[in-house]
Amino acid sequence: MKDRPVSENELDGADLYDRLDFYLSNYGSDRSITCVSELDGFFTSLACGQTTLLPEEWLPAIWGTSEDQPNWESIEQKDEYLHLVFILYVETMDTIVSGQCQPVFMEYDSGDSAEVLVEEWCVGFMRGALLTGANYQSDKAFIDEVFAPMRLFGTEKGWKKLETMNKEEIEFWKGNIQPCVIRLAQSCHPEIQFSNELDENPVIH
């Protein structure tokens, strides 16, 4: 893990995730977003909202309460963190606006097989929905339907339900995350034309 700022020329996708994970895991609290997958879910939720929140509304929410805001070791670290966060924010927003949905999930490789982990992403998505109020829109039946996978993988109540499910049921709900996010985004932004073909989700190893 690098502990120095990465220059603009060095930065690629892997560096972006690596550096953001460094800041999120080292400067956060138990109430903070702690990894890139969770942050991507948070930003995707903001992108699906009916109104666009200003940075001063969502930036503090990454860390939690006012007491959880980081004490930076230097202005250079703070500036780099903000630079990286805005890169991921713009990338996520542009993805939705361009009619695509590409959640950045985690992947656990046991050596014999690889498992896609969606919990962190869904926790971030639910955090964003709480901030935008998307989880409490007037059409409760529709919201319950499109939020079902994210509530299942992203809330304590959902985790208890997962304990009673078999592997096939869990995989079914994992496969519904992307379509449900697209439906939510389309309901709030009908002007966006989403592709009928689902893209393969990026994963962080």
Image (cartoon, helix red, strand yellow):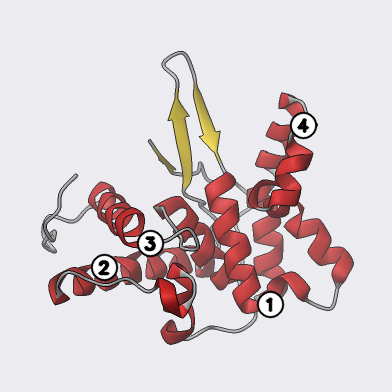
Label 1 or label 4, whichever comes before in sequence order: 1
Q: Which residue is mark 2?
A: 81
Using the image, determine if residue 66 lies above or below residue 168.
below
Q: Secondary structure at mark 2?
A: helix
Q: Quadrant of residue 192?
A: bottom right
Residue visible at 13% across and 72% down in the picture: 76
Label 3 or label 2, whichever comes before in sequence order: 3
Query: Within 10 Å of the Cα at label 3, are there few (<14), some (14-19), or many (20+) other Cα atoms?
Result: some
Q: Secondary structure at mark 4?
A: helix
Camera-nearest label, 4 or 2: 2
Q: Quadrant of the C terminus?
A: top left
Spot occupied by residue 69 in the image (x, y as percentages of width and height): 37, 74
What is the tally of numbered marks visible in this picture? 4
Using the image, determine if residue 164 lies above or below residue 202.
above
Q: Which residue is mark 4?
A: 169
Query: Within 10 Å of the Cα at label 1, are there few (<14), some (14-19), or many (20+) other Cα atoms?
Result: some
Using the image, determine if residue 64 lies above or below residue 126.
below
Q: Amino acid at mark 2?
A: Tyr
Q: Which residue is mark 3?
A: 28
Q: Which mark is residue 133?
A: 1
Camera-nearest label, 1 or 3: 3
Front residue of 140 and 192? 140
Q: Secondary structure at mark 3?
A: loop
